[in-house]
Image (tube, grey):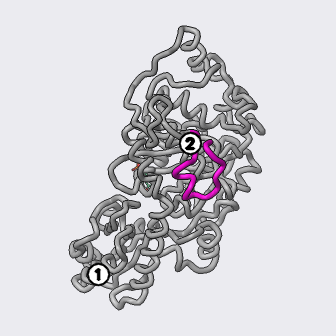
């Protein structure tokens, strides 16, 4: 580390060991666009492969540009180490595959991004890993679904469309009783929430969203909090406690030298086993792009949040709007969770239901001039989508309601433009939608 900083604004610029390029003294992190790294000798090469010495081997497994990004994101989260991946989807798949094998199960919140839902309900199922989906409004549902084969809990901090903040501490406390780690997808609220501080063991990101912000690159990240004892209940985590035949019998939970100061067997295995075997590495060029985004993330999140608050307040008072879904407007237990887990703002996702239903929702989207009509979120630009006619169009009215999407629901991802321009575009589109 170039400094032991605690403020996110400083960490995103100076976190991690990178200070300047050792070869040229360049201040900006260079794009090390190379596939391979030269070994000093056969002994050096053998040591690297045996993990007796740490160093660069091959960009599928590690790369100095990715390393600079990984260290900064780990520092930002208060974690010990991170792993950059080719997409958020790869990060969620790895997060589970690193602990669960055929015959095992995980317990996941029902409030999930559709891509994660498909991955868990269908693709991981084909691999023999069962996902038990539970309603997160009652944390005890996680305990009820747990059995001897449960390897992980999984949830999103600020899941859309419902925007009910997840009970991180409550569920991670239950998991810790059983030796089950909580993996949190924090994609929608970096900076605002640090799940590791509330007991989560692993944080997952689609860096494609706010961390990049520029909308140029697809990427993902896993952060190991170094706060979970993977060996305390060895039978609970066999992949980290039994000899790994693919790595001459290494036991990941005990192999890691004490000198590293924290249990990070999880992230080591994800890198040297899953990345080695499945690929899905982040390209150095994309890592460079994400570093550019990360450097202004705290500033952007402030603007995203204050703009979203302005939009939510405006929509709440508009005659054409039936209901506004925004973490800052939640009441009761959901409101308490939003205030407990989100600091500095309630995120930049705002949903609303138009009185005119599906037709009005579509008309609204078609009338937007500045907002982009895309399936993405977390871009610096403002984005909008009408789920009932796009992402959720295959669902029955009943299933739509279960996911929290109504026919007239519109999802906005509020950008960092001037709030007057955002409101002007929304206002004229609402007029057009009648
Ligand atoms: N998690 C969440 C909350 C997302 O919104 C997304 C993408 O929309 C993903 C994961 C998947 O990320 P990616 O598109 O980078 O694969």
Q: Which mark is residue 367?
A: none
| Nearest-to-viewer mark from 1 and 2 | 2
Find disc 2 in the rendering and name its residue: 71
Q: Please tell me which of labels 1 and 2 falls first in the chain.
A: 2
Up-down relation of residue 51 to residue 366 (above or below): above
Q: Which mark is residue 424?
A: 1
Q: Is residue 117 left or right of residue 96?
A: left
Q: Residue 315, image x and y in percent?
A: 39, 83
Residue in the image at 62% along x and 56% along y: 195
- Magenta stretch encompasses residue 169: no
SS under mark 1: helix
Residue in the image at 31% along x and 63% along y: 393
Up-down relation of residue 428 to residue 276 (above or below): below
Quarter of the figure with the C terminus: bottom left
Q: Residue 406, image x and y in percent?
A: 38, 74
Q: Is residue 368 left or right of residue 410?
A: left
SS under mark 2: helix
Which stretch is magenta?
1-17
Up-down relation of residue 83 to residue 388 (above or below): above
Q: Is residue 239 left or right of residue 374?
A: right
């Amino acid at each position: 580390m170039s400094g032991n900083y605690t403020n996110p604004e400083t960490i995103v610029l100076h976190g991690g060991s990178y200070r300047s390029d050792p070869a040229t003294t360049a201040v900006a992190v260079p794009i090390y666009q190379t596939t391979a790294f030269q070994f000093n000798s056969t002994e050096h090469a053998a040591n690297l492969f045996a993990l007796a010495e740490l160093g660069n081997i091959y960009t599928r497994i590690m790369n100095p540009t990715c390393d600079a990004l990984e260290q900064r994101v780990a520092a930002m989260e208060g974690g010990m180490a991170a792993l950059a991946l080719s997409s958020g989807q790869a990060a969620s798949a790895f997060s589970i595959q690193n602990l669960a094998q055929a015959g095992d199960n995980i317990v996941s919140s029902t409030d999930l991004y559709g891509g994660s839902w498909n991955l868990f309900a269908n693709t991981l199922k084909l691999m023999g890993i069962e996902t038990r989906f539970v309603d997160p409004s009652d944390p005890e549902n996680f305990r009820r679904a747990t059995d001897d084969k449960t390897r992980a809990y999984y949830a999103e901090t600020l899941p859309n469309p419902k925007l009910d903040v997840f009970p991180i501490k409550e569920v991670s406390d239950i998991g810790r009783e059983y030796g089950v780690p909580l993996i949190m997808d924090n994609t929608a609220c970096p900076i605002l929430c640090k799940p590791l501080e509330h007991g989560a063991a692993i944080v997952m990101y689609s860096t494609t969203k706010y961390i990049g912000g520029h909308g140029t690159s697809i990427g993902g990240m896993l952060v190991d909090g170094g706060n979970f004892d993977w060996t305390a209940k060895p039978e609970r985590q066999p992949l980290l406690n039994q000899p790994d035949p693919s790595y001459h019998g290494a036991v990941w939970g005990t192999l890691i030298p004490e000198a590293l100061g924290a249990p990070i067997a999880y992230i080591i295995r994800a890198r040297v086993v899953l990345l080695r075997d499945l690929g899905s590495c982040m390209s150095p060029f994309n890592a460079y792009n994400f570093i550019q985004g990360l450097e202004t993330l705290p500033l952007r999140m402030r603007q995203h949040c204050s703009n979203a608050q302005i939009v939510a307040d405006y929509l709440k008072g508009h005659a054409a709007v039936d209901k506004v879904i925004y973490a800052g407007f939640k009441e009761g237990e959901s409101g308490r969770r939003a205030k407990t887990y989100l600091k500095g703002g309630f995120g930049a996702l705002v949903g609303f239901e138009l009185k005119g239903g599906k037709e009005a929702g579509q008309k609204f989207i078609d009338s937007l001039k500045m907002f982009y009509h895309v399936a993405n979120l977390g871009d610096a630009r403002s984005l909008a989508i009408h789920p009932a006619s796009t992402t959720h169009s295959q669902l029955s009215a009943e299933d739509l309601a279960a996911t929290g999407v109504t026919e007239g629901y519109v999802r906005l991802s509020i950008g960092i433009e001037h709030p007057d321009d955002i409101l002007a575009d929304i206002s004229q589109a609402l007029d057009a939608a009648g």
